[in-house]
Amino acid sequence: MPVADQLSAEPGDPRAEPSARTEASVVARTARRTAVVLIGLGLLLVAVALSLSLGSNPIPIGRAWHLLLSGDDSFASTVLREQRLPRTAVAVAVGAALALAGSVMQSLTRNPLADPGILGINAGASLAVVLAVAIAGTSGLWFYLWFAFLGAGAAAVGVYLLAGTGRQTATPARLALAGVAVSAALAALTQTVILADQEAYNEFRYWVAGSLEGRGWSVLWAVLPFLGAGAVIALAIGPALNALSLGDETGRALGVRLTTARGLAMASVTLLCGGATAAVGPIGFVGLAVPMLARALVGHDQRWVAAVSLILGPTWVLLADTLGRRIVPHQEIQVGVVAAVIGAPVFVAVVRRRKVPAL
């Protein structure tokens, strides 16, 4: 309908109804998405409060807040400032990174069941850790951090090069196939090394479970530049990923450079997932289930999915970590184990209740 006719149409005129319905639909969708974001922020604040309050020595939330603001040098204040606060900050950064990486990976491959681990990042990090222990004899969190990150980056680059060999471009299907192949090969090498070296096996067994124990400010500052760069890239390419979700031809017609967009997406996933894995070890289901839940709540617009994932990811990791500290008295269960235990039933329930569409 011409613009002049739209402007002159009366409220009851049938010509005005399609436009009115469309506008009302957009307003309702935006309101729903905004409500999801606000509720998610509220849940995140609750998860942060629980993480600071609960542990082997519980501290009431009100007193924890007072200790953070005061200069008290009591035992509770020391525990809160030197252990729980940095641990909570690392959990927030890691959860946000894994969830955002998962949203980019699912959009990049147009597969709602894709996981950042499909790029071989976890497998590359694992192999680098066991090689560092077996060959160089290194041990300790600081050494794991850098070897794991280098291994994750090398694996992701290898997957991208393998997917784009010859005249073929790195299409979503080729990226997924290359990732599966590289992951299987690296996992086989890792098993070979840990079977031949008992020390490497012992160190790897602890690291691979995924844990926030002992993670302090030094770990956060070491990986934060990589996580920040990956997040900026992931948020910037949201419109391009939306266009690519319509197909390569449509994306190209909309002005998207396919190779550049996919390369940036790969870089963001590598920085986000590689940095998070290097900091705390592999944590499963966060990068898979959180973006899927975000899409169920706000639709397929990658910009909104990324925003909600940045909120729900930290909430998921914080609640898993807090629960792991409380299940067994005076003991701790690694966050990677708890995240998988609570994530698997949620994932199965979502898949069974909803038909999972292709992106």
Image (spheres, grey):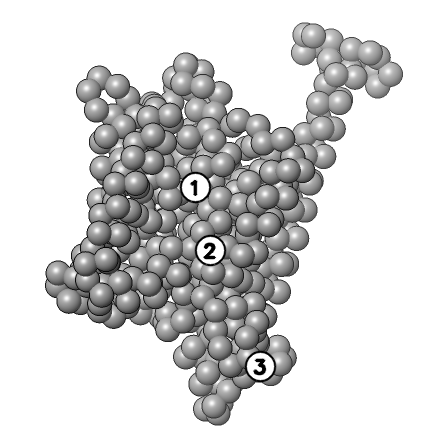
The quarter of the picture where residue 175 lies is top left
Residue named by callout 2: 95
Of pointers 1 and 3, the one earlier in the residue sequence: 3
**What crowding class fits label 3: few (fewer than 14 Cα within 10 Å), some (14-19), or many (20 or more)?**
some
Residue 58 circle label: 3
Q: x, y (%) of residue 261? A: 35, 29
Which secondary structure lies at badge 2?
A: helix
Of pointers 2 and 1, the one earlier in the residue sequence: 2
Q: Nearer the viewer, residue 319 or 349?
A: 349
Tell me the distance, in whole angstroms, between the alpha carbons under discs 1 and 3: 35 Å
Residue 115 circle label: 1
Of pointers 2 and 3, the one earlier in the residue sequence: 3
Residue in the picture at 29% in, 62% down: 204
Q: x, y (%) of residue 141? A: 28, 68
Q: Nearer the viewer, residue 273 or 85?
A: 273
Q: How many marks?
A: 3
Which secondary structure lies at badge 1?
A: loop
Tell me the distance, in whole angstroms, between the alpha carbons under discs 2 and 3: 23 Å
